[in-house]
Image: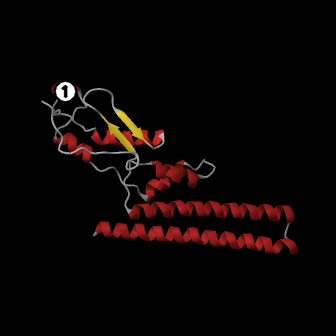
Amino acid sequence: MNRVPDAVAVASLDTHRLIVAVPNDGPAEITCNLPRPVAASVLRQIADGLDSPAGRCETALATGRPCPVHDGPAALLAAAEEPDALTAGDVRDALAFNAGENDPALATLRDVLLDTTATRTPEQALAAARVLFEAHARQIAALVEAHHRDTRTRWGLTRSTRGLLTGYEGARKIVTAYADGLADEQALAEGAATDQAQQ
């Protein structure tokens, strides 16, 4: 006896970006107007969403039921544990790790953005941004100072270089003050968080 559906949905590429049809008999049909890598990524996300802890071990596969060891309450609680949060200390550690890079702040920003395991609240993201921007500002201040030093060494202090050298020194002070302000803001935020945790 054939089951008669209550409704038949009609989908086309005018209304949908990706259509997957899996008949009872025969191969699946996929129609899309997405680039192939994007479509593959969407299908992987769907597969990950359908994947569950049940059925991953040999016992679950053999019995067709959740395994009492791997899919029991303790295992589900372990799987549900929140990952560690991103802290300003983590970002500082990453900066120290990347100290040998050409641009440590940029390399650390890359690492922080790619780390999808750590959770982050808006406050934690702001703390990470302060630490990264402070490090970047200090790098810029060091570059300006090096250029100032090279210019003075090469051309000396003359009437024509005095204004240029003064401008470099002023720029270095402005950028350093910006970095110091970020460091102060972060220190205050960390102090407030410590005080709140102690109450």
Report which quarter residue 134 is drawn in.
Answer: bottom right
Instruction: Name the residue located 27 percent from the left edge and 70 percent from the top edge.
Output: 199
Question: Judging from the image, what secondary structure is the residue with disc 1 in?
Answer: helix
Instruction: Name the residue located 61 percent from the left edge and 69 percent from the top edge.
Output: 176
Report which quarter residue 122 is drawn in.
Answer: bottom left
Give the answer, above or below, for where 137 lies relative to 181: above
Number of marks drawn: 1
Q: Position of residue 24 (x, y in %)?
A: 24, 30
Give the answer, above or below, for where 114 lies relative to 51: below
Q: Position of residue 164 (x, y in %)?
A: 79, 71
Instruction: Name the residue located 63 percent from the left edge and 69 percent from the top edge.
Output: 175
Report which quarter residue 61 is drawn in.
Answer: top left
Decide: few, some or many residues near mark 1? Use Cα within 10 Å; few <14, some 14-19, many ≥20: some
If the image is split into quadrants, where does the N terminus sit? top left
- Residue 137 as seen in the image, left or right of residue 60: right
- Residue 81 as seen in the image, left or right of residue 181: left
In the orientation shown, which residue stands out farthest toward the left? 1
Amino acid type at circle 1 is Thr
Residue at mark 1: 59
Q: How is the image coloured?
A: secondary structure
Q: Position of residue 133 (x, y in %)?
A: 54, 62
- Residue 119 as seen in the image, left or right of residue 164: left
In the image, 139 versus 120, the foreground residue is 120
Q: Position of residue 167 (x, y in %)?
A: 74, 73
